[in-house]
Image: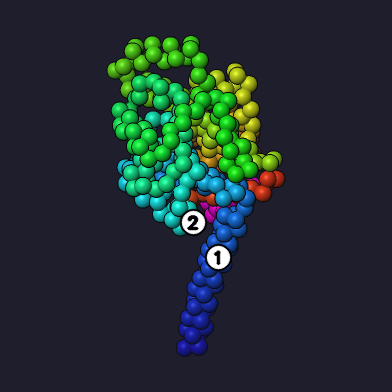
Amino acid sequence: MKKRLICRTMAVLSWLGALFMIWHFVSRALECQAYVEHMPFQAHFLNVDFGDCILLRCGGSNILVDGGSYKNKYFAKKKISQYLCERGIKKLDAMVCTHGHSDHYNGLEGILEDGFPVNKVYVSHSSFYNNRHESHYDKFLNIAKEKSEVVPLKAEDEFELGKAQIKVLSPIVSQKACQLNAYRRNAWRRDDKMLRDIENNHSLVLRAQYKRCSLLLLGDALLEAEMNMLNKKMNVASDVVKVGHHGLGQWARFYEKVSPKFAVFSCSGDQSDNPASLELAKELRQQKTEIMYTYRQGDIVMGSNGRSWTVARTDDSK
């Protein structure tokens, strides 16, 4: 009887110990996230499954870079609306649509339709002026023109987010490039993959600089866009990189030039298991880069004081 009581007591103490550890872990995680969300420059990578959505915050200014999901626009719109509401964000200084694929803009379209105030909508110069791969992108542009001011951007353009400077590294627009894309569209008009690749290479690539800290957002840029940036000697070196095209079809040499401390894969579990994504992750680990996945960790919040980065994350981050 006494032995049984001791066993039960030990079992209860074990459960209490486990509950305490869980409470301690959760409370520390919440404290870390609260701390990061009060840092002067922040990057929030939202978990939208197969898609991209990044909220940048600095000095009271807020910019949303992409906002879409392959699931559907209502999923992305709900996620974005709830996330902004929880942080008391009632207007956006700008939203950026990197290119004309729905897993990057369908949620943006949804919040514009709902009347969420947005001062400017930045779009890719190449996507705006060329024939679109997805006809639905025209609807997004029309809504954006009705609700806000649409501004096409290309390489070397710049804008500000509070005290942070944001520079466009791609698309690199030239007459030769426009002629080549027109030829490709005509030659490959029945090849959906080729047309998708053209649009992916039209992606806006943004590099944000806050004091000594830097962040590179690659949209869905592929090998051609990466090569063009290196050939034009663009400064791609950055502390943090949002990996291009969800980790698919990337060029390892390009990431050697980026030399990031942190890499974020905005993707679904299926995409992370793709051989190309696994190979890129392997290359990045060899560079001592810390890798994070939105599908595994959920929303990833990073903050900078201008000297270093702090990450609000779970122990699954590697």
Question: Tag count in the figure?
Answer: 2
The residue carrying pointer 2 sits among few (fewer than 14), some (14 to 19) or many (20 or more) residues within 10 Å by Cα, namely few
Rendering colour mode: rainbow
In terms of sequence position, does the residue under pointer 2 or pointer 1 come before the other? Answer: 1
Disc 1 is placed on an element classified as helix
Q: Which kind of residue does numbered mark 2 sit on?
A: Arg
Mark nearer the viewer, 2 or 1: 2
Determine whether 107 is above or below 277 in the image. below
x and y, in percent, of residue 265 in the image? 50, 40
In magenta, the rendered stretch is: 309-318
Residue 89 showing in the rendered view = yes
Residue drawn at (63%, 43%) of the image = 163
Decide whether the magenta segment is chiefly helix, strand or loop: loop
Determine whether 10 is above or below 288 in the image. below
Residue 208 showing in the rendered view = no
Q: Which kind of residue does numbered mark 1 sit on?
A: Ser
Residue located beneath label 2 in the image: 87
Disc 2 is placed on an element classified as loop
- Horizontally, residue 306 falls left or right of residue 87, namely right
- Horizontally, residue 207 falls left or right of residue 268, namely right
Residue located beneath label 1 in the image: 27
